[in-house]
Image (cartoon, rainbow, N blue to C red):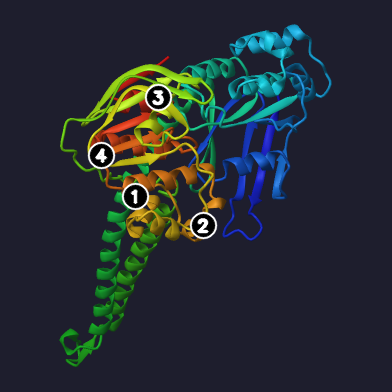
Amino acid sequence: MSLINVYSLTFAYEGGYENIFENVSFQMDTNWKLGFTGRNGRGKTTFLNLLLGKYEYEGYIMANVNFEYFPYSLDGKSRSAIEVVNEITEGARPEEWMIERELSLLDLPGSVLGREFETLSGGEQNKVLLAGLFLKENSFLLIDEPTNHLDMSGRENLGRYLKSKSGYILVSHDRAFLDDCVDHILSINKANIDVQKGNFSSWIENKRRQDEYELAENRKLKNDIKRLSEAAKRAAQWSGACEDSKYKRDNVIKQNDGVGKLDRGYIGHKAAKMMKRSKSIEARKLSAIESKSSLLKNIESSDELKICQERYHTGTLISLDDVSITYRPDVRACENVTFTVERGDRVLLRGRNGSGKSSILKLVCGSSEEFSYTGEFKAGSGLVISYVPQDTSFLNGNLSSYAFMNSLDESLFKAVLRKLDFSRVQFEKDMSEFSAGQKKKVLLAKSLCEKAHLHVWDEPLNFVDVISRIQIEELILEFKPTMLIVEHDRAFCENTATKTVLLV
């Protein structure tokens, strides 16, 4: 056991608009299972790269371990899976039974070790890389978004594996997955970086309570400041009036010699006393303002979203009856799929990777040039569909041009992005500079602005932060749009889906 100390860390990209981190200090234990969360664009991947020593920074990062990054980067050289493991472990050559034990924990047979690494599926490759990294001695793993594109069972299996390990930072926005395998949460907040013991559910509950306390305290201090301002103003007015009265004839008093005379000393003392009271009240007001300024710095904006869905004229929008999809040459994606999408349904397509989920969505959206199908597929007459694809790599250029090219109301489009935590600075950047989560939010904002009868979303939450996931979940529960979705976030699916179709 040892500590990773981060002290007075400050970093900004060259030519950047502002610091990503400023005077940040905290500690981590190398035995922790550390979940890493924060809104998109806050600097999670940047922080991992700072730990890896990829950028120069101010301050200190002190550790007695080697940081290893997942996904591990390999060159294109052909090699077997066991050679990949030996490369990762830097020639230490762990015994084969040790490697097979790791793979069995990841639900992968040891026979894959003799196969060429390039012939393994993406999921199999990731499991081999993870096994190798956890076999490496004196290493602390930086695991960046390992669940994207993993199906639900794959996530559950990976969660069990990581729960059996320790000594890692896990970047993920999947609430259920984090709950399955972490014992501490590292969060990048609006104003600081915070470390708490517990899983994601305990962290979000603590944050909710802290936010509620700060909002209540802020309301109380606002009322106090208003009351004190009015009291200070009255006291100052009374003091001024007393001081003026020293020279008024109404305040003349009779002396023994019968000559009228002002008691200016008494009146001046009274005015000074009132002014002292005014200054005391002003000091209390300034103290309340200072206390108020320390509140609400980490309150996340999560304004309510809306969806522009048109009502379709009949009850059934989509129907598939015994549909099978085949890619050329004769690669079967799915077989005998039967389901309907009725008005008000939120249909979740589930199945292992490669079971044809995305192919079904492409068929529904009319993009079936890549494959042929058999069976009966019907889409309603005049049906308008809004589609969110998995891929975001095509996004480039500025947001204004993107809104124009897609016939979107630019003001509405940018307002939705603001609600999804886009700063105004982002509006001036090229979309190719956005984080993966920010790019996905662009596609989601476009879909929310489109007037459609049916929203078809293919893994819409990949890379999207937790707060935004909850916003989207609340949107769906409030407006109850008709949807066809492929998604693997267990909590999101359990909360939003009204019908589940399992592809085998």
The vertical placement of 46 against 4, above or below, is below
**Marks 1 and 2, how far apart at CA:** 41 Å
Q: Would you say the residues marked 3 and 1 are in contact, meaning their CB atoms lie under 8 Å apart?
A: no
Kind of element beneath mark 3: strand
Q: Which residue is mark 1?
A: 218
Q: Would residue 134 appear left or right of 34 to someone viewing this image? A: right
Residue found 68% across the figure and 13% down from its top: 112
Which of the pair 180/151 is nearer the observer? 151
CB-based contact (under 8 Å), mark 4 and mark 1: no
Residue linked to disc 2: 397
| Tag 4 secondary structure | loop
Q: Which residue is mark 4?
A: 383
- Report which quarter residue 414 is drawn in: bottom left
**Kind of element beneath mark 2:** loop
The residue wearing badge 3 is: 373
| CA neighbours of label 3 inside 10 A, class few (<14), some (14 to 19), many (20+) | some
> Which part of the image, by quadrant, shows the N terminus?
top right
Element class at badge 1? helix
Q: Position of residue 52 (x, y in %)?
A: 71, 38
Callout 1 amino acid:
Asn
Mark 4 and mark 1: span between their CA atoms? Answer: 49 Å
